[in-house]
Image (cartoon, coloured by chain):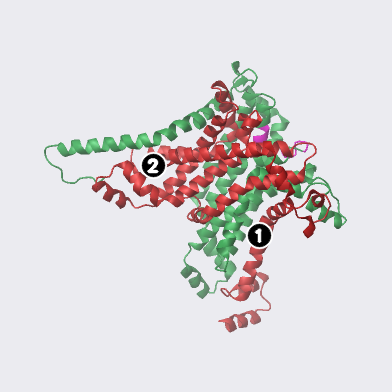
Amino acid sequence: MATRTDTEPTGGAYVDEFRAFLEDTWLGYALVLPSVILMGIIIIYPTLRGIQLAFYEASLLSPQQQTFVGLQNFAQMVGAPAFQTALWHTVLLTALAVSIQYVLGLGLALALKEKVPGAALFRSLSMVTWVLPIIVMVIIFRFLTQNGFGPVNIILGSLGMETTAWFGEPGVAFPLVVLMHVWRNVPFYAIALMAAMKSIPDTQYEAARLDGAGPLQRFRYITLPQISYVSMIMIVLHVIFTFNNFDIIYLSTGGGPLGNTEVLATYIYKQAFQQYAMGYAASIGVTMLLIMMVFTVVYAHLEARD
Amino acid sequence: MATETKQQTTQATDRSFADRLDAWLAEDMSPRRALVVYAVIGLYMTFLLLPVFYMVLVTFTSAEFLYSSQLVPALSDFTLDNYVTVMSTGLFQQYFINSAIVATTTTAITLVVGTLAAYSLSRFEYPGRSGLLFTFLGTQMLPRVLILIPFFLMMFTIGLIDSLVGIIVAHSVLGIPLGTWLLKGYFDDIPKSLDEAAKMDGCSHLDILGRIIVPMSLPGIAVAGFYTFILSWNDYLFVSILSQTAATRTLPFGLQLFQSQNAVAWELLLTAATLTMVPVIVLFALVQRWVVEGLASGGMKGA
């Protein structure tokens, strides 16, 4: 809507404009309303209810009976070894998966940005792991590491090495979970980072070359600084995805063996829907939410300062 | 240029490894550079695609081969038996149909609601607009397991447990924030001067949306639709809570029940998994150009 600089003295123009403004505003609200109502009912309200539940003793078996218990759920949570282990696993998984994904994604991005024949095809092909249903990925990995006839064990066996059901090995299950996170998300990083790299003008590289900078120096002083914004978005997004992720672990190990891969999301799910401790589960969910909010704020501040 | 580099390289016998690597890679698109690029891509493709390829390969072989502790099938091992068995299984058909109903309905609802919201957020100015945008994005940060607990109670109260409607509602709403955000990015790319011109010609807002914005952002709508479809097709968490009987199970839930049995029939499980993957791969093949482009134009469009 254009704002008028010279208006008629009658004031009719103002009225017209005001009416048009109201109409526009009204229509703007009307169009966005369905999504706001749906999100309000299905996302916002349950989240607020979840936060409220965290301060109540509530069982899934008798949801009508809810007693206010203050911070008791949180106190129970902090003292529970199972919670501490799950928190540690969640943080470790997030840190390992995101950093490995970033490094490997950067490597793939450097290769995919080159103008070699077939690069476009490889860009699309690499994305296959990212669109695959998680249950299919889990079945693939469980099959590969299956005891006896899984390809990994066939190869290990032929080399005379130990074979076992690897997802059942306490020391191996966690690295396998990290591997699945990495396998799934590397292409996403690669495509986004590649695009950021391609948007850097060639002239900058030419100038640096004339000044005697080699490829590694050019990467360090031209490429890296200019992909830092996209890098930040990718890292923040994936920290949130990985921290909150439920299905990769629940479907592959169920948190086992012996709790070795239990993370906060699977712990909450079990507490709420297998132990029926809704209030307690909600308090852990609120803790997850708080951790993610603090992380995002701190990271955004650090990034803004640089 | 080639001779120059060679001279530099030969002079540099006592330089560090990094410097020598620098010099070796210095030339743009020399054959050896292309070779390095292909080698790196080859390594990545092996890591990413070999597991998928191997699963698909095994589904076309007999169960005897699968349990034979051999890696490479002989020609005589190939058969379509697994596909015949899985596709004629009543439960698999049921799950597949449920998944298809849920994912397509979800995609349709999300696209309609998301398009209206994205048009509003892209073209109108009103109080609270930026707050709304922030809320759309912020919902992506909420742990879904936290939403799930009160959501389950709510669905229980209104009697939408064990109904496809409940699952569709859940998936649609989960898809709306990202779908709207993506669509808004594409709508923002269409010059506003087109709207103004249409308004001059007497077009209403709905005309503009239907005749200009939507036709011009079909790739964006395809991408948003694709993301919503895979969100719904892939979801396990919400279905596992909302579905109580086979009548409402979707494929991920069905496959999970199948794979957690004591004696897993791997040849059938892998075949069912491959069939579960097919619709997603086919859709991806159709929209991959725009998905890659969208990701490429600044990570998330509109961000």
User: Which of the two residues, A302 or B150, is positioned nearer the viewer here?
Assistant: B150
Task: Please check the rendered image and state whether residue A261 is part of the magenta-colored stretch, yes or no.
Answer: yes
Query: What residue sits 56% from the left and 54% below the top?
Result: B285
Task: Pinpoint residue A77: horizontal percent, then vertical percent.
Answer: 66, 28
**Screen quadrant of the N terminus of chain A:** top left
Task: Pinpoint residue A172: horizontal percent, then vertical percent.
Answer: 77, 46
Which amino acid, mark 1? Answer: Met
* Chain identity of mark 1: B
The mark that comes first in sequence, 2 or 1, is: 1
- What range is drawn magenta here? A257-267
Mark seen at residue B107: none
Query: What residue sits 23% from the left and 45% below the top?
Result: A3
Mark seen at residue B121: 2
- Give me the chain that's red: B
Occupied quadrant, residue B166: top right
User: Which of the two residues, A95 or A143, is positioned nearer the viewer here?
Assistant: A143
Which secondary structure dominates the residues rendered in magenta? loop
* Chain identity of mark 2: B
- Give me the chain that's green: A
Numbered disc 2: secondary structure: helix
